[in-house]
Amino acid sequence: MNTDTPPAAAPVPPPPAQSPYPVRFDVAYPDRDLDRLSTFFRIFYVIPIAIVLGLLQGAQEGGVILFPTLLMILFRQKYPRWWFDFNVEISRFTARVCAYGCLLDDKYPSTDEQQSVLLEIDYPDAKLGINRWLPLVKWFLAIPHFVVLMFLWIAVFFVVIFAWFAVLFTGRYPRGAFDFIVGVLRWGWRVNGYVALLVTDRYPPFSMRP
């Protein structure tokens, strides 16, 4: 009779954790009373900085040098670092203005400091990390995201109105409303990084989570 104990099965290694998406967005929750006066007049307060942002975006084809970048990736497989840095800084400025307009913070948007808004974008390896032909069709592949985001932005409009009243009466931004708006913005920035900034070929997740 064989009494040998069969060898224990080798443990199955866990699947490798997926690296963070190359575009990461977050806003620090203002765990304090917000300025009710600036909240009440936010639609007027945001106009000057929105004009500055609009002029920058208009001068640079929407703030993203899309077609030159696409052509450089397509024909040279290069993403010049200064184009990338410029696009990132314009994107960060846009994110701060958008967060201010959505009442996520009452600090006036800075033109150079990140403040409470974090937008990190990884510099791509255009030769090894980006398919030179994929940028031609990314806009088409992202159509499902555009459809979902259209409905989410409609929801954001009403949530911001709700938050406006909440801040006026309580001085605080409801955490659930805050997380929802930040999640939609995060989703939008991931899609923007995929379609417009062209920093990754990794398809954006259908998720508002970090």
Image (cartoon, grey):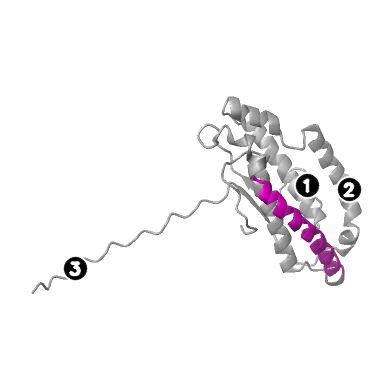
Disc 1/disc 3 C-alpha distance (Å): 67 Å
Q: Quadrant of the C terminus?
A: bottom right
Whether label 1 touches label 3, CB < 8 Å: no
Q: What element carries label 2?
A: helix
**Amino acid on which disc 2 is placed:** Ile
Say which residue appears at 62% left-offset and 55% top-offset: 206
Q: Mark 3 points at which residue?
A: 6
Q: Mark 1 points at which residue?
A: 110
Residue 196, placed above or below residue 25: above
Whether label 1 touches label 2, CB < 8 Å: no
Residue 31, placed above or below residue 147: below
Is residue 207 left or right of 111 when viewed as pictured?
left
Can I make out residue 119 in this image? Answer: no
Q: Which of marks 1 and 2 is nearer the N terminus?
A: 2
Q: Is mark 1 on a helix, strand or loop?
A: loop
Whether label 3 touches label 2, CB < 8 Å: no
Mark in the foreground, 1 or 3: 3
Q: Earlier in the sequence, mark 1 or mark 3?
A: 3
Q: Is mark 3 on a helix, strand or loop?
A: loop
Give the percent coordinates (x, y) of residue 111.
77, 43
Q: Residue 151 carries which label?
A: none
Disc 1/disc 2 C-alpha distance (Å): 14 Å
**Amino acid on which disc 1 is placed:** Ser
Q: Does the magenta stretch include residue 66?
A: no
Q: Which of marks 3 and 2 is nearer the N terminus?
A: 3
Give the percent coordinates (x, y) of residue 64.
72, 36
Find the magenta span and give its range.
Answer: 142-168
Q: Is the magenta stretch mostly helix, strand or loop?
A: helix
Q: Mark 2 points at which residue?
A: 47
